[in-house]
Amino acid sequence: MNKTYVAKPGELEQKWFLVDATDKVVGRLASDIAVILMGKHRPTYTAHIDTGDFVVVVNAAKIAFTGKKLEQKKYTWYTGYTRQREETAGNRLERRPELIITEAVRRMLPKNKLAYKMLSKLKVYAGDEHPHQAQAPEPKELGIK
């Protein structure tokens, strides 16, 4: 009789992937990144253990939006004062492009304590430079139809 494999913490070696976000659609790229962070791309996926890999995203400032989302999509957040702050996707892309990808991926992860560990393995940079050359991240093409 075959037994079901259950991964144990620290048992699996975590890889590093390098993703270029140039001209990639935000949602498609974010969903592929979320799958890798959760570890669902592996046959040894275990829901209650962090089996995912590290993802380094470069060129976040060159991300693409479909349709009129650049002008019409609104990002809102609460500051503690009596109203919410709001800005368009175009303004956020100029101001903090890393936050667009990070927030899109965060919302696609499970809503539990393990998601914080998964999100800490995501490294997003606006330009094409990153400080993770020592980990030798292997290039991976994500966000393709």
Image: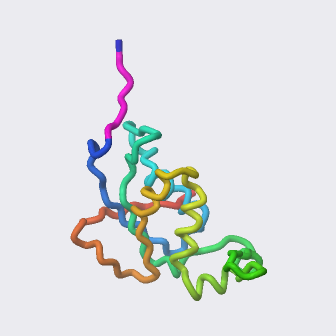
Q: Check if residue 3 falls in the magenta segment.
A: yes
Q: Which residues are magenta?
A: 2-8
Question: Which residue is drawn at the image coordinates 49% and 75% (left, top)?
Answer: 22
Where 97 sits versus 9, above or below?
A: below
User: Does residue 8 appear left or right of residue 66 in this picture?
Assistant: left
Question: Which residue is drawn at the image coordinates 73% and 76% (left, top)?
Answer: 74
User: Would you say the magenta stretch is mainly helix, strand or loop?
Assistant: loop
Viewer-proximal residue among 112 and 45: 112
Viewer-proximal residue among 122 and 49: 49
Q: Position of residue 54 (x, y in %)?
A: 36, 60
Q: Position of residue 41 (x, y in %)?
A: 43, 45
Q: How is the image coloured?
A: rainbow
Classify the position of the N terminus by image quarter: top left
Question: Which residue is drawn at the image coordinates 39% and 68% (left, top)?
Answer: 56
Quarter of the image holding residue 25? bottom right
Q: Position of residue 145 (x, y in %)?
A: 57, 57
User: Does residue 35 appear left or right of residue 49 in this picture?
Assistant: right
Q: Position of residue 27 (x, y in %)?
A: 61, 63
